[in-house]
Amino acid sequence: MSKFSDLGHRLYTGEVSYDFIARRRRWYIFSGILLTVSILALLLKGLTLGIEFEGGADFQAPTNVSASQMVQPVRDALERSGVPNLNEATVNTIGSNQVRVQTRTLDTTTEVPAVRGAIGQAVGVPGDQVNYSLIGASWGGQITERALIALIVFLVLVSLVIWIYFRDAKMSGAALVALLHDLLLTVGIYALVGFTVTPATLIGVLTILGYSLYDTVVVFDKVRENVKGVKTSTTKTYSEAANLAVNQVLVRSINTTIIGVLPVAALLFAGTFILGEGPLKDLSLALFVGMVSGAYSSIFIATPLLAQLKEREPDMARHRARVQTRRDKAEGRSAPAAAADDTSADDRLDEPDGLVGVAPGAAEEVALGAKGGTRVTAVPASARPAVRPVVEGAAKRPQPQNAPRSQRKR
């Protein structure tokens, strides 16, 4: 853990970093593959809509034994009922003493009594104690239409809020792209695995939209802090400042995602393998996929896309050219300087005595300053004071050796 904390500190200070912006193409390709698979799954398999959207019949029957033990007997009873096309009926449990059966739309005069009787016989109660309700397809259509309207209004308001908060339309556009990326990926996963889309799924999808937006706003807030005054800087470009921001929030995003995903993964496991069909399963898959996708898109999609859009601005293009020109000049100066360092030892052999950096054979007096000023006089080696001799003492360190007082010059 200490090493991970140390890594987070080194990422925050810029001591180490991963260049997310420069390697954006590989992440674009990776996301493109995921989105292509999602779109193909939607086109080829489609979503498995619950009866709330397609319409159907819902039966609920009490039972005296464990409800989970009655799932298979109820399925067998439906097959023996003589009502056709009940193979795709959903049988699950509600609590520990109730069985729920969802089927296609049934005829109220002939098919509903047959199904109620079959279910009642399976659970051991009279058929008239099996409650049922019919849901029309028009009700599901109204829910779908209102959900789409709510989603469009949500996206418009979100884009406006981000635009006003950051005062940058490109940040709003990049956040919206990341949001649609997470939405399409989550819906595609539902089509791929075949989970039923219910009102609980819609709640989960709307929740992950908020989570994805929150993570993107946190990263953009750090980007805004780092790019403040970047146009007047000659040491870094917008992309480099944005990349530093991503590295600074990377550990935080990983930590918050892991902490948030762990309980959702537990809900998904319990809903899928323990409780079976139910709202918990429908809700947890949307949350799990959306939270992981939201953390990924805020780092690998939203910020690189924002940097790419900003670098296309004329001001940013000129600023990037200035930074590159300064770096080229610095590299040009460093090369001769390095060569001079290599030959400095040989040049010093020919320097006049008492001066450093004076060409061989130069006059004894060297003027400093273009208009004359302080003049430095070269001192011959014979006129310079002798360096006090040193000897190695008992401590094996050089010791000054002063001449006796009687031998000193007066």
Image (cartoon, rainbow, N blue to C red):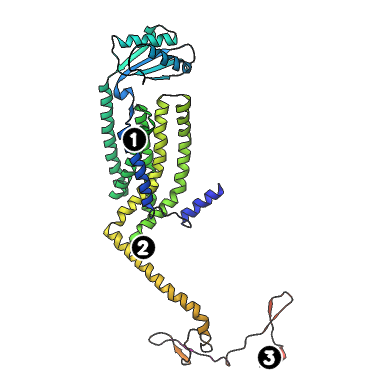
Residue on which disc 2 sits: 233
Q: Which of marks 2 and 3 is nearer the N terminus?
A: 2
Disc 2 packing (10 Å; few <14; some 14–19; many ≥20): some
Q: Earlier in the sequence, mark 1 or mark 3?
A: 1
Instruction: Give the extent of the magenta segment.
Output: 372-381
Disc on res. 41: 1
Disc 1 packing (10 Å; few <14; some 14–19; many ≥20): many
Q: Please give the name of the residue rendered at 38% of the width and 54% of the height, measured from the top-left corner.
A: 21
**From what the image shows, is residue 291 above or below residue 238?**
above
Q: Can residue 34 be seen in this view?
A: yes
**From what the image shows, is residue 113 above or below residue 155?**
above
Q: Please give the name of the residue rendered at 46% of the width and 37% of the height, measured from the top-left corner.
A: 261
Residue on which disc 3 sits: 408
Q: Marks 1 and 3: CB-CB under 8 Å? A: no
**380 in the magenta segment:** yes
Magenta span: chief secondary structure: loop
Going by the numbered disc 3, the residue's amino acid type is Arg
